[in-house]
Structure formats: C-alpha cells, structure tokens
Amino acid sequence: MIVSIDSIVNPPYHLTNAILKGLSEVSEKIGALRASHLDRPSPELRKSHQVKTIHHSLQIEGNSLSESQITAILEGRRVLGPSKDILEVQNAIEAYRRIGQWKGKDEKSFQKAHGILMQKLIGNPGRYRTEGVGIVKGNEVQHYAPPHDRVPYLMKELFTYLKESDDPVLIKSCVFHYEVEFIHPFVDGNGRIGRLWQTVLLSEWHELFSFLPFETLIRQQQEAYYNVLALCDKAGNSTAFIEFMLGILSAALANLLDQSLKPKNREERLRYFIEQFSGDFTRVDYMKLFKDISSATASRDLKTGVEKGLLAKTGEKRNTTYHILNEA
C-alpha cells in the first residue's frame, strides 16, 4: 500500500533479514549458472521457457489453453479453443517476443506493452483507467485502488523511483510489481503487465531473466501470491511481497540450474549415476535417481553400461543386480 499518494519516489518497505537472505541466494544462483555457462540456454530451451511463462501467467488469469496449444500458436499452427483465450496467448507471445525492446524505466514503453497484451480484449488498451475500481474476492471487496485521477501522477512517481532510486534492481523490480497491483492503473490486465514488467526490469539487469519462467512458481503458489498482496495492503508497505518474490526468483533459478545440469542422454546418465552411487544396485535404484525415465529406458541404459564395461551384471529378471566396475 502507498502510505501517501502525494509521493512514492521511495515506496515504503523495510529491509529485513529475509530480504537480505533472498538477495544473497539469488546472486549466488546467478553466479552458479554463469560459472557453469548455463546462463545462455539453447534456442529450444528458451522457447520452452517462453511457453511456460506465457502459459502460467495467463493461467493465473483464468486462461484455459495448455502448453502444447500455446506451442502450436507460437509455431503458427491452428488450435481449437475459446477465441478470447487464443487472443490472450497471441497477445502475450507478441509482448514477450519484444522483451529486449521494452525499456524498463520508460512509462510510454510500459503503456505500449500493456496495449499489446490487451489489444482487442478491452477498450483503450495501454491507457490508464478513467474510473474507480475495486478488487472483489468472493462477496467482498478486497482492495480499493486509488482514485482514477491520481493514477497518472502515481505512475509517474513510480517510474521516477525506477530511474532515481539506488535500490538494487532485484528489490526495485519487486516493488514495481507490487505497486502496479496496488495502483491498478488499467481497467484490466494489471496482473499480467506487472509480471511482464518485472521480467523486463530484471532482464535489463541480467539476460537470463528474459527466459526465466518464474510465473510457473507463482501459479503453483497462486493463493499465497494473492494473500501476500493483501497482507502488504494492510501493512502499508511491500516488505512481505519483496520477501515472497525473492523466494520465487531464487526457486526459479534453482530449478533452471537443476534442469540444466541433469544428464541429457544415456552416456551422461550412466556417468552421473556412477559418480553418485557405490556398491551393488538394481534398476529400481537407478530409476530413483532418474525419475523422469521409463523402466524400458532404464534397462537400455544399464545394458549399455554393461556392454561398455562400466557395469557388471549378475542374476536375471527381478533378481538382476549391477555392480560398478573400478575401471569405470
């Protein structure tokens, strides 16, 4: 919540141990990704992450299309689905495609991005609202946004904060995300533009955020996401939201690091297993480490290991065990 609508050059929040810890964790994971040369993924992985980002950001807003349908739209193929949902995806694809073109500290760029996200979905997309709004949850109004005639001033001050504050970008991106949700500058589409613009601000700081699908984790914790927004409204500052979003970003980076380091083929899986395991083991033990492969794939992996002299096999069928050879 903005305590005074006369100035938000320094939006209110408190620097807590949780925020400091979050900043440290995010920085450490960025360093790990950079050190492992994993901060510049392949075009295929970028595309996959873009689909996840769009899917989950729109799913938060009630969009019904699946990842496969979004992939089809991204590739120019026709899909069956509600016309509104398809249009939302088409708009989001175009807005996220321009991540490198948007200027995070420029208000006109922000409004233009909203115009693309919401084109043909609302009247006057990209223009600030000219009416009062309230956020309704159930039968109660959970949040009354500031009067519409204050919106242009509040947004100007928010962008002044982005330009002039010495706060770390990680914090500024979280503050901006929260304040957009609080000010509610547009009639609709505030959630999706808030998440998009946090990505824009972070990607200007470090390229890897341009393809980090942190929206996936927000979708998985959607109730907590809305609860912390409401908590901040009552507290009169964005402290809890900064803590929450730094946790989301840290977890998203950890997932990216984990996915990037996972063995990608049979030889890599065998070598990785040999490094992690010792003694006799079974196919079940092998599959506990690689939960996303089938039993048939595991059997072929182990057969290859035996043929290459990496493993020794004893027994048959259910009584089969394997042993890692010393020379492996």
Image: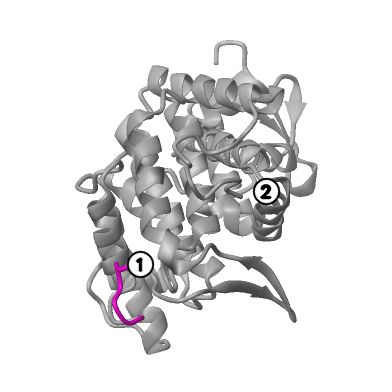
- In terms of depth relative to the viewer, which is nearer, 48 or 146? 146
Q: Which residues are magenta?
A: 122-128
Q: Is residue 37 left or right of residue 141?
A: left
When asked about the image quadrant of residue 187, the answer is bottom left
The numbered dot on residue 232 is 2
Residue carrying label 1:
128
> Looking at the picture, how far across and down is residue 55, in whole percent?
46, 64
Q: Is residue 232 above or below residue 304?
A: below
Q: Amino acid at mark 1?
A: Tyr
Kind of residue at badge 2: Cys
For label 1, count other residues whose C-alpha is less than 10 Å away and answer few (under 14), some (14-19) or many (20+).
some
Residues at circles 2 and 1 in contact by the CB criterion of under 8 Å: no
Residue at the far right in the pictured view: 319
User: 166 or 62, which lies in front?
Assistant: 166
Residue drawn 51% across the image and 53% down it:
215
Residue drawn at x 66%, y 37% is 289
In the picture shown, does residue 14 fall above or below 78? above
Where is residue 162 drawn, in percent x and y?
37, 36
Mark 2 or mark 1: name the one nearer the start of the chain.
Answer: 1
Camera-side residue of 288 and 183 = 183
Question: Considering the numbered disc 2 on the image, is that residue within a helix, a strand or a loop?
Answer: helix
- Of helix, strand and loop, which one carries label 1? loop
Q: Main secondary structure of the magenta part?
A: loop
